[in-house]
Amino acid sequence: MMAHPAHVMALGFGSGLSPKAPGTMGTLWAWGVFALLQHRLSDVQWGVLIALSIPLGWWACSLTAKHMRVLDPGSIVWDEIAAFWLVLWLISPTGFWGQLLAFALFRFFDAAKPGPVAWADQLYHHVQPASDRWAWPKAGWGIMLDDLVAAFCTLLVIALWRTWGGA
């Protein structure tokens, strides 16, 4: 993990090294960091942090996957972190129960991969590193993309619930 800064980031500062449910551990790490920083960062600062976390995450995920020689390693969790920060930022202000609902929805969409999440997940799984010089950057984008789609689906459900559920 410590061989390169990209590995530290991609592996979620160690949360992705969990032997069980690394994606869930990465999402919990994201939630914990959000809880610690939510009142210390302004909306603009959160926006900048998240905006930077996506291209930096793409780079870190691409490089780490390349070094591991696996197109989508389960231990890479930066995709969950950046995507869940986006969800938490966009549903704020909300309390613990709203954040817990967002966590449950995001984990459902990320793990079950219904519809568009499955499409995004499979988009770059066919790349061939031996013959495609852009295989690793494509793999890194694929790692990030399905979680961003899961975040969008989570936000859509929450928006519909807020609109029609009366909350």
Image (cartoon, rainbow, N blue to C red):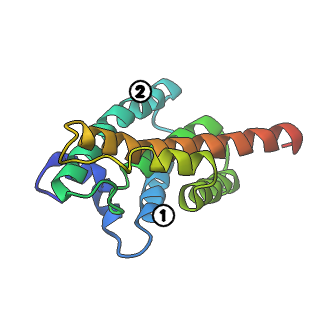
> Horizontal and vertical percent for residue 82?
43, 43
Mark 1: secondary structure: helix
43 horizontally vs 163: left or right: left
Q: Which residue lies furthest to the top in this view?
A: 44
Q: Nearer the viewer, residue 135 or 19?
A: 135
89 horizontally vs 77: left or right: right
Would residue 88 be visible to someone looking at this image?
Answer: no
> Horizontal and vertical percent for residue 12?
33, 55
Mark 2 and mark 1 lie on one chain; the one further toward the N terminus is 1
Q: Residue furthest bottom?
A: 19
Mark 2: secondary structure: helix
> Horizontal and vertical percent for residue 144?
41, 43
Look at 54% across and 55% down and name the residue there: 110
Amino acid at pointer 1: Thr
> Horizontal and vertical percent for residue 62?
26, 44
Mark carried by residue 48: 2
Q: In this view, does 95 lie above or below 107?
A: above
Amino acid at pointer 2: Val
Look at 21% across and 45% down and name the residue there: 63
How many angstroms separate mark 2 from mark 1 (CA)?
24 Å
Look at 87% across and 45% down and name the residue there: 165
Q: Which of 127 and 156 is in front in this view?
A: 127
Q: Which residue lies furthest to the left in this view?
A: 3
Question: Hey, which quadrant is residue 160 in on the image?
Answer: top right
Q: Mark 1 points at which residue?
A: 24
Q: Is residue 45 above or below residue 129?
A: above
Look at 45% across and 44% down and name the residue there: 123
